[in-house]
Image (cartoon, rainbow, N blue to C red):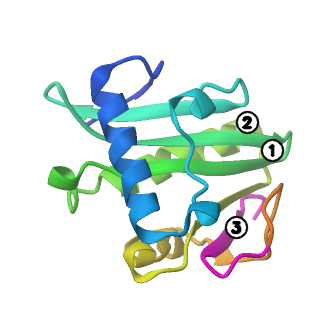
């Protein structure tokens, strides 16, 4: 598997992100969907990566800088046909390594509280993320789970 910085211009990534947004919209009320579209991901404080193998797009993930010491994991998604292959694990490892390289002391994330998001919450827990209060511009929402991991230790 190859992880590369993605410029968000290819049709494959547009299709994968469309599936990501559809998943959020199908499992959360509109006001609780915090997934970003292509334009939202093109913000200068976001680095976006895609995972490829043999010319096929497997998944994606992003890291947003909230402050010089705090990053937010965003837009994690694995293509349905590639789930169970370790794509998300590899992407989280990559994002955490990049966060440490940047000197972040903390990485946080928001995901859904519904059953459809249980696999994501389990993955993040395996990487040492723990539930926390809302961070950044988020507010308390029963449809969201906020998680964070201290990188300083």
| Label 3 environment density (alpha carbons within 10 Å; few <14, some 14–19, many ≥20) | many
Q: Where residue 95 sits: x, y (%)?
A: 55, 45
Q: Is residue 113 magenta?
A: no
Lower sequence index among marks 1 and 2: 1
Q: Answer yes or no: do the residues labelled 1 and 3 have beta carbons within 8 Å? A: no
Q: Where residue 74 sits: x, y (%)?
A: 57, 48
Classify residue 27 by image quadrant.
Answer: bottom left
Question: Which residue carries the number 1 mark?
Answer: 66
Under circle 1, the secondary element is strand
Q: Which residues are magenta?
A: 140-153
Numbered label attached to residue 17:
none
Q: Answer yes or no: do the residues labelled 1 and 2 have beta carbons within 8 Å? A: no
Q: Which-is-in-front pick, marks 3 and 2?
A: 3
Under circle 2, the secondary element is helix
Between 141 and 48, the residue placed more toward the observer is: 141
Lower sequence index among marks 3 and 2: 2
Question: Which residue carries the number 3 mark?
Answer: 148
| Label 1 environment density (alpha carbons within 10 Å; few <14, some 14–19, many ≥20) | some
Q: Where residue 83 sits: x, y (%)?
A: 22, 58
Q: CA distance from mark 3 to mark 2?
A: 17 Å
Q: Residue at x 78, y 59 (%)?
A: 152
Q: Where residue 20 sits: x, y (%)?
A: 39, 50
Numbered label attached to residue 102:
2
Q: Quadrant of the N terminus?
A: top left
């Amino acid at each position: 598997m190859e992880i590369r910085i993605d410029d968000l211009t290819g049709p494959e990534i547009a299709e994968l992100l469309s599936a990501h947004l559809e998943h959020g919209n199908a499992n959360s009320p509109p006001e609780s969907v915090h997934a970003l579209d292509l334009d939202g991901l093109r913000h200068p404080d976001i680095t976006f990566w895609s995972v490829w193998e043999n010319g096929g797009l497997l998944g994606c993930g992003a890291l947003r800088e909230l402050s010089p010491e705090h990053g937010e994991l965003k837009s994690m998604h694995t293509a349905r046909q590639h789930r169970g292959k370790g794509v998300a694990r590899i992407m989280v490892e990559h994002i955490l390594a990049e966060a440490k390289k940047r000197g972040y002391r903390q990485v946080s994330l928001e995901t859904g509280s519904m059953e459809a998001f249980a696999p994501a919450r389990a993955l993040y827990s395996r990487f040492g993320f723990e539930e926390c209060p809302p961070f950044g511009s988020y507010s308390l929402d029963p449809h969201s789970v906020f998680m964070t991991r201290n990188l300083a230790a």
